[in-house]
Amino acid sequence: MSLTVVNGLPAHILIVHFVIVLVPLSALAVVAGALWPGAARRMGIVLPVLALVALASVPLAAEAGEWLEEHVDSNALVRRHAALGDGLLPWAAGLFVLATVIWWTTRGRAATEAAPGKRSRSTASRSATVVRVVAAVLSLVVAAGAVVDVYRIGDSGAKAAWQDGFSKTATGDGDDNG
């Protein structure tokens, strides 16, 4: 079953709003969690769940967009938007993987500190620092890529929908209650 129309509107127009909000929000949360482990601990399981919902919204928007693409006049702007839209899934998947790793390592770190382990504290501390630095760098790269991609896709979609679709001067046909 695919989503095509919701309340008379193409479902793509509605679903993309989840992507537009959740992907950048997930990117921000992932970066915050990677840079400040205390923030990741406070977010807890919400961090990977948020990224999972963002990830799930991407193919839903793409599927609804493919349906819409078949029901509008094809032009270069629509084709560009569709092509750009296909590139977001890997970024969203990267955010989910990083969110899960950050959640797991901050969760595990609290448990390690509470229970004595076989490794010395300095070895565990070095390993945790390496993981945090790698996660922070990857988080910054993936978050930036995801947000830039969302912007580019949204910009191309707006151009495809609105290019030559409105008058730059007021037509005078609307109700002016002002």
Image (cartoon, rainbow, N blue to C red):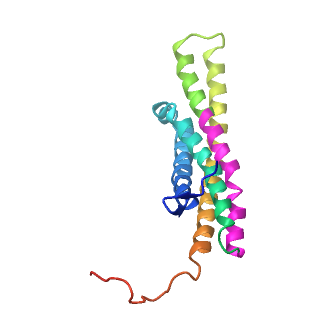
Q: Is residue 121 left or right of residue 29?
A: right
Residue 175's spot in the image, x, y percent? 33, 82
Q: How many marks?
A: 0
Q: Nearer the viewer, residue 138 or 72?
A: 72
Tell me the residue at 60%/57% (across/down): 4
Image height of 102 relative to 152, above or below:
above
Tell me the residue at 70%/74% (across/down): 74
Image height of 88 relative to 80, above or below:
above
Residue furthest left as drawn: 178
- Asked if residue 82 is among those painted magenta in the image, a careful observer would answer yes
Residue 139's spot in the image, x, y percent? 62, 44
Residue 71's spot in the image, x, y percent? 65, 68
Residue 86's spot in the image, x, y percent? 71, 57
Tell me the residue at 55%/25% (across/down): 107
Q: Which residues are magenta?
A: 75-100
Q: Quadrant of residue 138?
A: top right
Q: Quadrant of residue 112?
A: top right
